[in-house]
Image (spheres, helix red, strand yellow):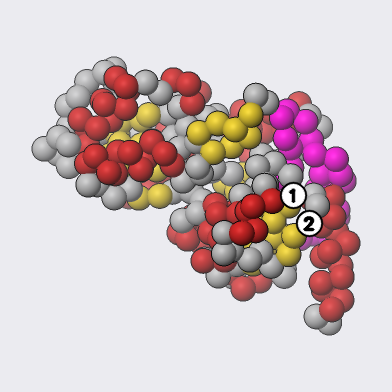
Amino acid sequence: MQTLLFDLDGVIYQEGQAIAGAIEVLDWVRDQQIPHLFLTNTSSRPRSAIVAKLAGIGIAVDEAKIFTPAIAAVNWLRTHASNHTALFIPEETKKDFRGLPLLDGDTELGVGAVVIGDLGQAWNFATLNQAFRLLMSDSKPQLIALGMSRYWRAPDGLRLDTAPFVMALEHATGVKAVVLGKPAAPFFQAALNILGATAADTLMIGDDIKGDIDGAQQAGLSGVLVRTGKYRPDDLEQGITPDAILNSIADLPSWWQNNRSDNA
């Protein structure tokens, strides 16, 4: 392996605190000059807020090192969308979409794309039904999913993420979503393109057996599962075999050195 991709929530930090050893591991990555990016399906905040959140818990990360579905979506919309875009994402995340023609208010007029992210407790019937009606309009907009994470671990326990709402809209409308986030292979490839890396030389480290590990492996990368974050023991009973399993990100340097030595 020559290149590293890291998930953030559940791998680098959890419940508002850096995971033990994570800061030291990231210092090691920089000291070793290992090319890397942070891939997160977070759509509840823009990149600038992610950087600020990490800084608040002692983790210094350059904004350019964070690749989110929102950034991937902006690039996609600039190329493919010729009409206004309806955003079903938190207000703060809309900052990443500045400069694009966006639909205002509660209108149900035709648009070119409907973007679904993690609205959390802001989801209600009226909001979901507005997205449904837009997708059923004569303009036949494209459904854009900012990742397909099923759930995440919040301080009060597991919470639904983006995928259940996207799948409900797909089922109701018959419109297949374009997924711009994990586990979609194009999202991983876009990250590799940024780094100038190949899939065969890249390792994805995550806590989500499907979104991180299976998604990476399907895209040709290797996947290492950590036993932190949303990891559950029955993850290993789903027919997905990680290339390695670490107790936490703190074990990465020793595993990395041993793995390189074994292949020398």
Residue highlighted by disc 2: 246
Q: Residue at x 86, y 67 (%)?
A: 257
Per the rendered image, the range of residues in magenta is 11-34
Q: Nearer the viewer, residue 72 or 217?
A: 217
- Give me the disc on residue 145: none
Check the image and name the residue furthest to the left: 138
Q: Amino acid at mark 1?
A: Arg
Q: Residue at x 59, y 63 (%)?
A: 240
Q: Is residue 87 left or right of residue 65?
A: left
Q: Nearer the viewer, residue 62 or 19?
A: 19
Q: Is residue 24 magenta?
A: yes
Q: Residue at x 67, y 33 (%)?
A: 51
Q: Nearer the viewer, residue 237 or 15?
A: 237
Does residue 153 appear in the picture of this structure?
Answer: yes
Q: Is residue 54 magenta?
A: no
Q: Quadrant of the C terminus?
A: bottom right
Considering the numbered disc 2 on the image, is that residue within a helix, a strand or a loop?
strand
Residue highlighted by disc 1: 227
Residue 197 percent across, percent down from the top left:
61, 67
Residue 28 percent across, percent down from the top left:
86, 53
Say whether marks 2 and 1 touch (CB < 8 Å). yes
Q: Assess disc 2: are there few (<14), some (14-19) or many (≥20) residues with their C-alpha within 10 Å of its C-alpha.
A: some
Q: Is residue 218 left or right of residue 54?
A: left
User: Residue 202 occupies which quadrant of the picture?
Assistant: bottom right
Spatial CA span between label 2 and label 1: 6 Å
Q: Residue at x 66, y 64 (%)?
A: 242
Considering the numbered disc 1 on the image, is that residue within a helix, a strand or a loop?
loop
Q: Amino acid at mark 2?
A: Leu
Is 26 rendered above or below residue 121?
below
Q: Quadrant of the N terminus?
A: bottom right
Residue 235 percent across, percent down from the top left:
63, 53
Which circle's residue, 2 or 1, is located before the other in the chain?
1
